[in-house]
Image: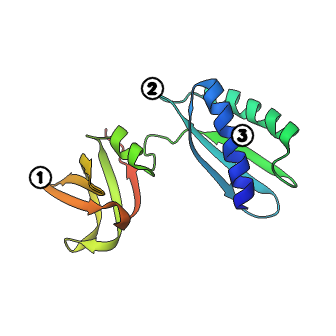
Amino acid sequence: MNDIKQKVSQLAGQIADVQGVELFDVELIGTGKLLIRVTIDKEGGVTLDDCERFSKSLGAVFDVEDPVPGSYTLEVSSPGLDRPLKSLEDYEKNKGKLVRVVTSEKIENQNFFIGRILEIEDNFLKLLVNRREINIPFNKISRARLEIEL
């Protein structure tokens, strides 16, 4: 499965470069008929037309390269307003924004935080939570995503 994901990521990355979008994530879900979920992003947000164009291009490349044995469903989408944060670059890009962070171990007697990203330094995420600064080691973060602010 890792070989397939690597090949799909490589092909999707090439399409992303040509179309001026960022390859945000590639997921392979299931066995038998595989669901290939490709998430793209770009400055200012992804439109439905961006997703459709990307899907058609990637589908055409899949027809030629045949990276997936058997049948599959290809899904192309944007990460959404409450996008997950997966890399240091994601945290940097979203400095100042409100995030929800779940940790694998308790920090200051809790493992769930909602706060603003203040800084990213020395393998720590510095959050402002209820007017307090909290340093969370990146290796203790289980999940993190943006919070939708209204």
C-alpha distance separating marks 1 and 3:
45 Å
Kindly identify the residue that appears in the image at 35 percent across and 47 percent down: 147
What residue did someone put label 2 on? 44
Amino acid on which the number 3 mark rests in the picture: Leu
Of the two numbered discs 1 and 3 on the same chain, state the one appearing first in sequence: 3
Amino acid on which the number 1 mark rests in the picture: Arg
Left/right placement of residue 122 relative to residue 21 reads left
Task: For mark 2, give the secondary structure.
Answer: loop
Label 1, residues with CA under 10 Å away: few <14, some 14-19, many ≥20: few
C-alpha distance separating marks 1 and 2:
30 Å
What residue did someone put label 3 on? 11
Amino acid on which the number 2 mark rests in the picture: Gly
- Percent across and percent down for residue 135 are 21, 60
- Percent across and percent down for residue 33 are 81, 58
For the residue pair 110 and 7, the one nearer the viewer reads as 7
Kindly identify the residue that appears in the image at 19 percent across and 71 percent down: 108
**The N terminus is located in which quarter?**
bottom right
Looking at the image, do the residues carrying marks 1 and 2 touch, with CB atoms under 8 Å apart? no
Of the two numbered discs 1 and 2 on the same chain, state the one appearing first in sequence: 2
Residue 49 appearing in the image: no
Q: Looking at the image, is 134 positioned above or below residue 19?
A: below
Q: Looking at the image, is 139 positioned above or below residue 132?
A: below
Looking at the image, do the residues carrying marks 1 and 3 touch, with CB atoms under 8 Å apart? no
- Percent across and percent down for residue 93 are 36, 38
What residue did someone put label 1 on? 131
Mark in front: 2 vs 3? 3
